[in-house]
Structures are given as structure tokens and as C-alpha cells.
Amino acid sequence: MKAELQTTLESETKFRNHQKKHKSKIKMEHNQFDNEYYVMSMDGASNHPLLAWGNANFEPFLEAEPIDETAIEIPLKIVFGEPFPKEYEIADLLMLDANFAGSEKLKNFFIKKGIWGIQFIPVEIKSNKGEIINGHYAIHFWNRLPAIDKNNYEGSAINRFGKIFSLKKFSLDQALLDEIPLEKRLIFQLEESDITVLVHQSIYEVIKAENLAGLKFFRVDEWDGNAMFR
């Protein structure tokens, strides 16, 4: 037992040292794509509830492919997560654990624009007081790209699954995005960071004019891990 504990501590020390070395080496440099893309986030308003999966099956949302809606129970029954707001407003964009939920208005916007790589699954939301709210959708961003420049980001080291657990700042991979037609990258989720969704400036400029509640955007070269709380 003592030997196993020692091995675990040594592995943890090596991992943390690797993280420190990675962070200390990086001097962020941004490119044209960092000016063209925005990180989409919720606005963090205290009256916008956080949502949780409850007993709903979230596993299909982990996959980078469309969900077979005949294989799941619809609507998905999700719930308010803690902390519960005293008074709540159901915004057009809400956090659903590490995913997003969106309104009918937001769904119709994306459908009208013909955005590739997004799917909307109907949900039934139950508040902490037992109220039932309909008209929202779990958003499945199945268009995922490994678009972070691995030599130009701040955060934890990439793990064996290709994920960056703690992303502080990043720059986009120019070579990769140059090879992908714009219509296939108007909106996508970073493969390395499951919660990070990027929106091209052409969509950002239009969606801002829609006055949708709950959305906040940060240009990639201005974003950091604490941006939502500003």
C-alpha cells in the first residue's frame, strides 16, 4: 500500500510539473482566425437557472454524430440544478451541465441559417418547485473539430483522451481551419474542450441583432477561462 501511494504521488507530481512547464513556455500569439471566431457562453445572470440532466440519458450527447431520436425518450426530462434562483427567467440559452439548452427562438434561428452540425432535442424542464416548463431543447453540437493550436494555448496538458481539462487561453489552428469549407465550420465545438463552442463572425453579427436572452460572446483573442464571470 505504501509503495502504491508513493507511485501515485510521484505520478501526480510529474503531471503537475508537466503542466507548469507547459504553461511557462507559452507566450500567446494570435492569428486571423482568432479574430474571426467567438466563444459562445451563457451570460451568467443570477436569475437564469442552471439545468441538470436528472434521470435523462445524456450519453448520446457525448458522441460527435447526430443522435437517433427514435432511440431515446422524447422529451428528455431535465431539472433545475443547484444553486436554485429565488426568482427565475427561462432565457434563450441556458447551461445544461456541460452542454447548452436553447429556446424555440434560438432553434429557429439556427435552422433558418442552415447551420451544419447542430441538433435540437426537445426537453421538459422541471423546476425545483415542481413547475413544468416546455418549449426548450437540449443542443447537441456534433460538429467537433480539434482546432486548438497545440503549441499556442494556456492550460493543463492534453490528457490521453485528447482533452484539455483546464483551458485558460487558446489560439486556433490555422492550417486545420484553412482546409475546412466555411459552411462546415460556421459553428463547432472544440474537440479538446467539450464545453467550448465557437461561432464564426458572420453568424455572430446576425445573432447579436436577434436580441436573444442569456447569450454572451467573447472573441477568441479576448477570451479567457473566467470570461463568463466578467
Image (cartoon, rainbow, N blue to C red):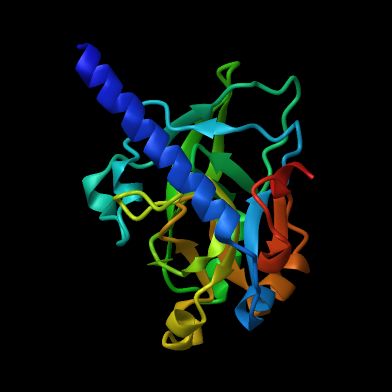
Please tell me which residue lies in front, 22 or 47.
22
Does the rendering let one see residue 107? Answer: no
Task: Say which quarter of the image contains residue 86.
Answer: top right
* 119 sits left or right of 212 in the view: left
Image quarter of the C terminus: top right
Please tell me which residue lies in front, 135 or 101.
101
Labels in figure, total: 0
Q: Is residue 13 above or below residue 184?
A: above
Q: Residue at x 70, y 53 (%)?
A: 215
Residue 175 position in % (x across, y down): 46, 84
Q: Residue at x 50, y 73 (%)?
A: 115
Please tell me which residue lies in front, 1 or 139.
1
Residue 132 position in % (x across, y down): 55, 28
**Residue found at the far top of this picture:** 1
Please tell me which residue lies in front, 8 or 70.
8
* 167 sits left or right of 85 in the view: left
Task: Say which quarter of the image contains residue 169.
Answer: bottom right
Q: Residue at x 41, y 60 (%)?
A: 191
Q: Is residue 21 above or below residue 45?
A: below
Image quarter of the N terminus: top left
Q: Is residue 131 above or below residue 2?
A: below
Does the rendering let one see residue 12? Answer: yes
Residue 60 position in % (x across, y down): 29, 47
Residue 188 position in % (x across, y down): 48, 67
